[in-house]
Structure formats: structure tokens, C-alpha cells
Amino acid sequence: MHHSSLLLDSFNWFTALPFASLEVGQHLYWQIGGLKVHGQVLITSWIVIGILVIVSVLATRKVERIPSGLQNFMEYALEFVRDLTKNQIGEKEYRPWVPFIGTLFLFIFVSNWSGALFPWKLISLPEGELAAPTNDINTTVALALCTSFVYFYAGFRKKGLGYFRKYIEPTPVLLPIAILEDFTKPLSLSFRLFGNILADELVVAVLVLLVPLIVPLPVMLLGLFTSGIQALVFATLAGAYIHESLEGHGDEEEAH
Amino acid sequence: MFDFNGTLPLMMFQFFLLVAVLNAVFFKPLTQAIDERDGFIRTNNTEARERLAKAKSLTEQYEQELAGTRKQSQQVLADAQAEAQKIAQTQITEAQQQVQAEVMKAQAELESQKQSAFSELEKQVDTLSQQILNKLLGSTLA
């Protein structure tokens, strides 16, 4: 009892310091129509979207044959996501999916890095705090559902209702697992991203709380690394899922 | 923490909006730029390759022509040399013949002069011998 109160006291002492605090599960609520939304998530997501759109517009304002500066950089980014998509979906069909997977990668990457690099917490809100949009479960689930939606769309566009054949194609015994897969895919996508980003921010926050100088730096670097990897993983898996529904099960691909 | 609300559909909506916007301002123009550059480089490359092949064939052609011309010039040179030699030969033989003819003529003239000189000498010998005879015998005869 005594110990725990001491611990609580020290914790209160820490939280009283101005440079670090921990808040989980507190949100700035906005009321839009009949919906409650997380304002802090939307604000940072708008900033991220704004950065992406402004940089894109600046890069493509005057497209030149010999690229330089921003155009060169954005072409590098484009080639990166193009290669990523091509590796997953294959040379023949990857082109229509580059915008989706590329946007997925860029949005998640910029979101994660904005959370890791920009000191959002210096901007104080009436409630909750600004952070990477991807550390909110709503964002990651939204992105994962978009991915699900897109891979269903890809399958239907390619094969029509024949897309459903993939559920019973090798054997109808696997039907429950095939259906389950459609739920586990967005679930694993969203929770992987959410967990990694939130955990990274929490670890950094806790370390800053305990030792405000130097010690959190390696963890912050690790966070940058994780952020990039998570964006890559999300985009790669989205590509793999789209490829899966384009290709389908069975030998029909080889047949014609 | 697991607090689902209106953020989710709004996020989906704005994400698809972002896909559309980025497709218009980023993916399409830059993909087009990259493809155009690819095409440009490819055509340039094939053009350059064609030009190189053409240049090579031209070089070959020129080299053949050069070899032919060189051969021709050597032929001309050899012909001219042969002709010159022939001319020189004929001129030499002509000159020799002329010289020989002149020598013969000179010899013949010499011979004839010798003959005439001899005959004159003989005539003189006759007169002299007559005179000697006259001188020797004349007194006695007279």
C-alpha cells in the first residue's frame, strides 16, 4: 500500500514535468452530423494529405524530360511503388493498381514519419493530442477495409461472379477457411499497423518520461525504421491480396 | 483505444479521394513522363544503332572503294612505267641503229676515201716512178 502510493506519487511528479506526458485513449471529439469523429486524427491526416498533394503538384507542375529536384525525387518514389506493385502483381496487370498501392504506401509512410519526426505534442489541443494518424485504430481499419474493398473489386472486375469460385476451387472443404481469410486479412493488416505505430509512440513517450535526454534517441531511430517497414509491409500485402484475387486458385491461368 | 466511430468511414472516403487526387496530379503525369522518356530513349537508341550500322557499312564501302582505287592507281602506275620503258627501249634501239648506221656510213666513207687516196697514191707512185725513171735514165737516154 505504502509502496504503491509512493509509486503513484513519483508518477504524479513525472507527469507534472512539462516535457512529457502519456495519454492513451483520450480523443478530441467532433460532432459531424450524427457522427462522432476523432478530430486530432482527422487534423493530422489532412496535414499528411496536404503534404502529399502539395508535393505532388509542385513536382509535376512542369514535367521535364530530364528530371531535376522535386520531380526527380517524386519519380524515384513513383518508381519505388511501381516496382513494389510490379513485384506483387506481375508485369502484365500491375499498372491499374499502382495508384492505389502507391497512395497506400505514401500515406502510411508520411503519416508514420510525421508521427516520428514532427513534435505534434507541442501543439496543444483542448483534449487528446496530435499524433500520427496511423496510431488510431479507425485509420488503420479504414485503410485495411479499403484494401479489402479493392481486392474484391479487382477480383470481380477480372472474373465477374466467377470470382466466388476461388472459395471452393481446390476443394469445398476449405470454404470456411477461405471465408475466414477475408476477415483475417483486414484484421491483421489494421492491427499490425496500429499496434506497431502506437507501441512505438508509447515506447518513445515512456522513455522520454523516464530519461528525457539521449536515451530515447535509438528507440526513435528504431521507430523511424519500423514506420518505413510497416508502410512497406502494408503496401506489399495489399499488392499480394490484389494479386491473389486477380490470379485466383487453380489452373485457369495456365489453361488459356 | 478501440474506439470506432465516424472517423472510420470518413477516413475511407478521404483515402479514396486522396487516391483519385494523387492519381490525377502525381501518378498519371509522372508515369506518362517516365513512359515518354522510355520511348524517347528507346527510339533514340534504335536510331543511333541504325546510324551506327549505316556508318559502319559506309566505312566498309569506302574502304572497298579505297582499295579498288589504290589497286587502280597501282595499275596505272605500272602501265605508265611499262609504257615508258617501252618507249625508252624503242628510242634506245632507234638511237643505236642510227648510231650504227652512221658508223657504217663513216666507215664506208673512210673506205672510199682510203680507196681514192690509195688510187691517187698509186697514180702518184706511177708518176713519181716515171719521174725517177726519167731522171735516172733520162740523162743517159738524152
Image: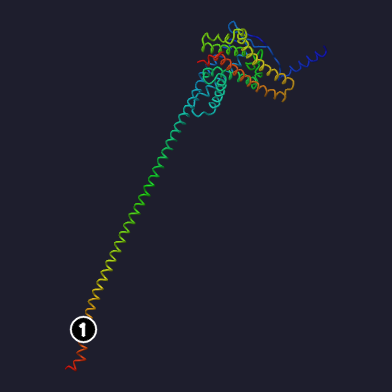
Q: Secondary structure at mark 1?
A: helix
- Residue positioned most to the right: A2
The percent position of residue A65, horizontal first and vertical second, equals 49, 28
Relative side of A72 to B70, left or right = right
The quadrant the N terminus of chain B occupies is top right
- Residue positioned most to the left: B142
Name the residue at 22% across, 81% down. Answer: B122
Image: B82 above or below B119:
above
Q: Residues within 10 Å of mark 1 (few under 14, many from 20)?
A: few
Task: Name the residue beneath numbered marker 1.
Answer: B126
Name the residue at 36% across, 52% down. Answer: B78
Q: Quadrant of residue A76?
A: top right
Callout 1, which amino acid? Asp
The percent position of residue A156, horizontal first and vertical second, equals 53, 10
Image: A176 above or below A131:
above
The percent position of residue A99, horizontal first and vertical second, equals 54, 18
Closest to the observer, B83 or B43: B83
Q: Chain of mark 1?
A: B
Closest to the observer, B22 or A212: B22
Image: B95 above or below A231:
below
Give the color scheme: rainbow, by chain, secondary structure or one colour: rainbow
Image: B131 above or below A218:
below
Relative side of A146 to B121, left or right = right
The percent position of residue A175, horizontal first and vertical second, equals 60, 7
Q: Quadrant of residue A38?
A: top right
